[in-house]
Amino acid sequence: MNTGAGSDSDDHLQLEECALGSDDDTESGRRPPWTRIWRSTEPDTLTVYRTSLPSHAIDKSNQVGCTNDHLFSNNYDLYRCGHSMRSQLVLCRPKRCKAQQERSDDDDTGAPLPCPCRYKFKLCLSSDLCEVFQQGVYMMDINDPPTPVKRKLTQEMKNYIVGSLSAGEKSTAARPYTLICTLVDNNEMTGPAPKGTQVRDFVKNWRRKNPKDSMAPLIALCDGRLYDQQDPATLLDTEMVILCDSQPNSHPGDTGLVSHLGDGSTSYPLRVGMTCLRMMKNYIDVQNSPNCTSILHIDSTHNMAINGYVVFTFGYSDRSGHYYPMVYFCTS
């Protein structure tokens, strides 16, 4: 890769407006000269180089005649032939320059002046040659301490968290956060350490986008508490009971029933209800009492359904407006 700032004789160039493109303002004659600070003949190197510059923003971008020094790369054909380049005027955006200007500005009535430092990116459209020029100096104090590195989740940290979650590790976001901080402190992972909220949000979003694709825990829960297999005489009033479709047990020698859960499709719906004997007995007592008047409620909500299934709540209320739940159903 050919990179550099040029020879000693052309390090400092007083560039005419036509040489940099027609997007310079009328004050170009009163500004300091443009100085070439970098150039390269390799593709995609400007993007990497820009990460080493202070904060900046492209203000103007025009297609003009190319004025890059193609003799530097021994490209005589482009040197002789007219062609185009992309000329980009780049303005300084560091917060430290703004803060320095505010500290040194004694005139509160006038508008704050922008930082005089500017860049010019010259990108040849017929080759990979690009040149960077700088004009002026930054307003920030050169003796200021280095800018703190922004705390964020790097791709390495994200891969580490995804690897832990994909392995089936059951933990809160606090565990990967603590492990990442330890790895950073031991110089085993590039820092700085992220914020705890960044790890927590990443874990939450990843789990939402990658739900567990396993029905085994739900099937085991339904099989163990299936209403068709319970004995009401020995069952505690507060013990959970599952209401769902059932089928004969396919295991040899077992004549009991097991749950028969659907996959959520139209032809094979998912229907799972949760209640207890006390809730059902209370409703039966209300219906059998001639002195009680009740209203049956069937409410639905999506807020409780992580996977988009509707949650129905069956309950009833008395004349005083007291509400009593009876059964919760999750159905597709």
Image: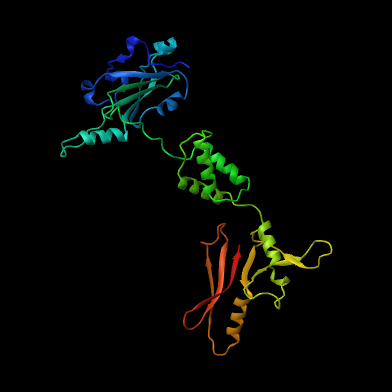
In the image shown, does 139 or 57 lie closer to the viewer? Answer: 139
Residue 142 location, quadrant: top left
Can you name the residue that lies furthest to the bottom here? Answer: 290
Against 323, is 200 above or below? above
For the point 43% across and 17% down, which residue is it?
A: 3
69 displayed left or right of 117: right
- Percent across and percent down for residue 259 are 71, 64
In the image shown, does 126 or 311 lie closer to the viewer? Answer: 311
- Percent across and percent down for residue 166 are 61, 45
In the image shown, does 312 or 268 lie closer to the viewer? Answer: 312
Against 80, is 115 above or below? below
Indicate the quadrant containing the C terminus: top left, top right, bottom left or bottom right: bottom right
- Percent across and percent down for residue 34 are 29, 19
Against 276, is 213 above or below? above
For the point 73% across and 71% down, which residue is it?
A: 229
Against 24, is 102 above or below? below
- Percent across and percent down for residue 44 are 47, 25
Residue 139 location, quadrant: top left
